[in-house]
Image (cartoon, rainbow, N blue to C red):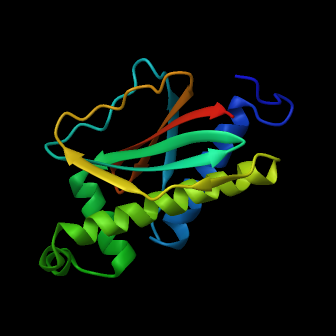
Amino acid sequence: MSFDKTRITDDTIQDCLVKGMSSVFQVMLRLDLKFVRRESPESATVPESDSQIIGNVGFGGKINGIVYLAMSEDLARTLACHMLGLQPQELAEHGSDAVTDALGEITNMAVGGFKNTIADMGYPCKLTVPTIVRGQNLTISSIKGATRYVYTFECAGAPITADLHMQEE
């Protein structure tokens, strides 16, 4: 990858993503998000659970990429309850679309925070529309030509994986 290494380093990318994620969780959800560690892309996995959900938002411009936020469906419901100010039973009455919409917005805001910081460093880009995928035994494959950065966070006692794939234009 040919990023200007004096401006964008692996540590810079990590700091930008952690900052974007933490801000959304503190301001929008009023929840603490703990950064746990950076993972090796070769050993990275989606948090295991009976039902998983992944939100993703892409970005394009001088730098192109996509960020996947992967978690259990249970954690996604918890986040949706906090974001929407609902009790679990109230959320259930709204159906799975409420969780989908909330996770899409959480992903959009977290990636937006990352994108804004990178743009301030001279790499302007625009976001795509969030996409949500649900299932079991989900995996995230590397994108050809992209550098992959995988981070583990913890919120409400459950893991969240932030999987960033990025390449210069």
- Residue 74 sits above or below residue 122 on the image: below
Residue at x 56% of width, y 39% of height: 65
In the figure, residue 155 lies in which quadrant?
bottom left
State the residue lying farthest toward the top. Answer: 42
- Residue 16 sits above or below residue 40 on the image: below
Side of 119 relative to 95 (left or right)? right
Residue 53 position in % (x across, y down) = 27, 49
Q: Nearer the viewer, residue 140 or 125?
A: 125
Residue at x 25% of width, y 64% of height: 77
Residue at x 80% of width, y 54% of height: 120
- Residue 67 sits above or below residue 108 on the image: above
Residue 102 position in % (x across, y down) = 35, 68
In the figure, residue 31 lies in which quadrant?
bottom left
- Residue 41 sits above or below residue 6 on the image: above
Residue 147 position in % (x across, y down) = 58, 26
Residue at x 20% of width, y 76% of height: 91
Side of 29 relative to 101 (left or right)? right
Q: Identify the image quadrant of the N terminus.
A: top right
Q: Identify the image quadrant of the C terminus.
A: top right
Q: Nearer the viewer, residue 34 or 43?
A: 43
Q: Nearer the viewer, residue 51 or 78?
A: 51
Side of 50 relative to 144 (left or right)? left
Task: Count up the numbered dots.
Answer: 0
State the residue lying farthest toward the right. Answer: 6
Residue 34 position in % (x across, y down) = 50, 49
